[in-house]
Amino acid sequence: MPLLQIDKLAKQFGGVKALDGVDFHIDEGEIVSVIGPNGAGKTSFFNVISGMFAPDSGSIVFDGDHVAGHLPNEITKRGIARTFQNVRLFPNLTVLENVMVGQHCRTSQGLFGTIFQTKAQKAEEQLIEDNAKEILSFFGTRLTGYRHDQPAFALSYANRRRLEIARAMATEPRLLLLDEPTAGMNPKETIELTQLIEKLRSERGLTVVLIEHDMKVVRDVSDRVVVLDHGVKLTEGDYDSVSTNEAVIEAYLGRPTTEASS
Amino acid sequence: MSRDSYVTRWGLIGGLGMSFTGAIGMINSFDERILINPILSMGYLTLFGLPAVVGYVAAKGEVNILEEPVHDIADGALKGAGTGLIAGVAVALFVLFTNTFDVTDFFPNMRQTMVDVMTLHLDLVIGLITLIVLSAAGGAVGGLIYGLDDKARGGVRRATLWVIVFALFELVVTDIIDIEVITDLIYARGGGLQTWSALIIGGLAWWLGERYQGKVSEFTAMARESEQGSRLRWSLIGVAALGIVVLPMLVGGIVNELLINVALFVLMGLGLNIVIGLAGLLDLGYVAFFAVGAYGMAVLTSPLSPAFSPELNWWVALPVVMVLAAIAGLLVGTPVIGMRGDYLAIVTLGFGEIVRLLLLSDWLTPFFGGAQGMTRIPGIAIGPWTISGTSPELFIYMTALFVGIAAYISHRAQDSRVGRAWAAMREDEDVAEAIGISTVQAKLLAFVSGAVIASFAGALFSAKVGTVFTNSFDVVVSLIILVVVIVGGMGSIRGVAIGALVLIGVLGGPKSQGLLTEFAEFKLLIYGAILVYMMLKRPEGLLPSVRRSRELHLEEAEQDAWLQKKGDSSEDEEVEATT
């Protein structure tokens, strides 16, 4: 049984059909890329899966449970975490706090424990902090040491993207949705992030769906590629079959200029 | 803009300000309070303080961060004098106008007594000339102060500040010293500092400040940073606690009364601070929870409660009141779960008024007494004693206890799982939800904890006063609490305390007088002025929380970050090379 099984997912905004009957599935441990032109419905696809919008119709089954229409925080608790296309950190919280807050749905201490400083509360705080530090160390030296106490807005662009992934990891997900993780990164950083995604699977056992425009990244990390256009799934398959598919070239990839001009 | 146009502009602003304070009767009523006997009353301080302020501003001119500011005594004094002169001429024209035409129908304070005070009780012509000359002199002093070097300017500032503090807080100082021989040395019999004691205080402030200036900041930095600091901090807290215990014994009934008011507002400020400062929910109907606390306590303890009168002990009733407040918090919180920002503010504002109007309504009058209110609420029983408003010296300890509890709760909540969830929600509600925070729970928790803390204040208030009337729960109370939080510094516990001390203690609360009874009439005006000034110049408040000041100075910080970025990326290169 796939980890995530989506059938005939549809979502309409006014007259625009953002998603028009999309079928999708991903198995545990897979890395799948979703590509397609701007406005194809990729981000809407993520928004519906993560619960930020309820779908109009169709089913989303995660790990055997129907999750369509559930609140985002419930879906996160079930094990689906995401990042955002236009990095949305908590800018005035420190780097460490940004990750610690991600542990919220895996911890339970309330105001009572906080006020009375119960043993359980202290232990949990310590655990949250240790987990957060451990997750940040996953990114090498980039987000450790003095950076722990820096406010998130002081980070460089690439580091903000890394921190957002770290925050998503802190929710201890099984499925990670990455929305254009390499957007705005330079080639070196892009390569590094590609390796990181691979590491997310090999070391952390995560299943990853990513929206990506950089075809090199798509080629390097994906087990499978899904192409969306106008809210419809155009095709899917491995990178080679998709990148040579006529319809995909027409809708998204385009032909090499020499061919096009002739 | 050329610097000369600054002189004209600020001169006119100064003249307008002086005329305005005269026209609203401020100068006259302030004139009754002597600050330095016999030369300076509060009225004249206001009147001639204004040209000094505009003189200072005009001498400062346009702020250009790229250039080192010029501090030149002659230049400053000249510009200041020019500014003061313009202000003086403008206000002289205003006085002349008032003297010539009778406009008392529209401006009841623009009458002969105002003219008399503003012309320093001299003949009209001589008085006007004196007014202009003194205004110019005031401006010159202001400009001159700007012209001084940093050290001297700091000295002048400290000296002025301390002289004014000693003069304004005469009541407190005499209460504390309480030995007539000494207070007579400092203060004149008819009120106000003796001239020479003012000079000594100013001189001491100048000298001591210069001597110990660096030390204080060094000390606080140490208290904040080092390992040794944590012990230091505890001893500081100990000293503060000792002060809270000792101070009420030293000061008299009036000041204690005032301190109780301050403490009640600190308490409500701390509660509202959780809702607004930590969770970012703009609640303008906060007074409703205060009302629930006060009325709940009244019904449960007063023998005259019209419908239901269990006549409980205050301590027994307190948990019940807390539960009631928590329910009220849920009732207000639940319908506004989906609302944000402005909408939330408007709806909560409505809720606040609904509670007051319901209490007044025919429907609930049989239960809560309606316009007649509730009376004969007993004080707080501790053993054989009963503490109520008639013994403010003891009641202050009760309020201090609850302030301590509320401060402790806020302090703990800030850096906890709950506090982080609130902070995340304040920064970006959608994302907070997407990373697994139940915003419904977090919001309700904020509303409920804020409501319970406000109910403490209500319960204390009804026990102190012995009666409750709906007019104590006017919407203006909500707004004043909000101003206390904003002026003090959102999200900061110390800030709320300072805000309440300055606003409620010095100026006076919505229904109570502050230390400066002369301000009573102009309280809301001054509140407004302070609020506008703070929003423009110091939006993070007097003692901000680190996080809030980050938020409000984001642009600057982003610029810093941009400047730093080069350093950052080269550092990344380094990391790259080593790995």
Image (tube, rainbow, N blue to C red):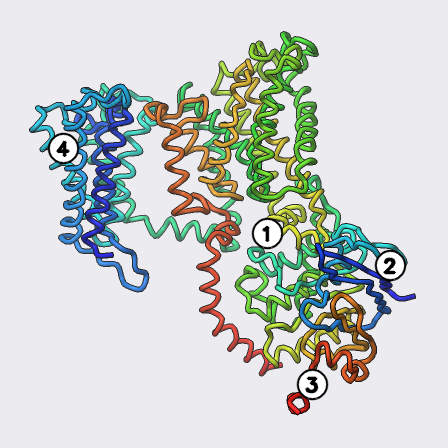
Residue A123: where, in percent of width, then height? 72, 51
Q: Earlier in the sequence, mark 4 or mark 1?
A: 4
| Residue at mark 3 | A255
Label for residue B427? 1
Q: Amino acid at mark 1?
A: Glu
**Gap between marks 3 and 1 measured at Cα:** 44 Å
Q: Which residue is mark 2?
A: A61
Closer to us: mark 2 or mark 1?
A: 2
Crowd class of label 2 (few under 14; some 14 to 19; many from 20; radius 10 Å):
some
Circle 4 residue: B131
Confirm whether residue B301 shows in the render: no
User: Which residue is rendered at x = 67% and y = 15% of the image?
Assistant: B300
Residue B226: image x %, image y %?
50, 55
Q: Residue furthest front?
A: A262
Circle 4 marks a residue in which chain? B
Q: Quadrant of residue B92?
A: top left
Disc 2 versus disc 3: nearer the observer = 3
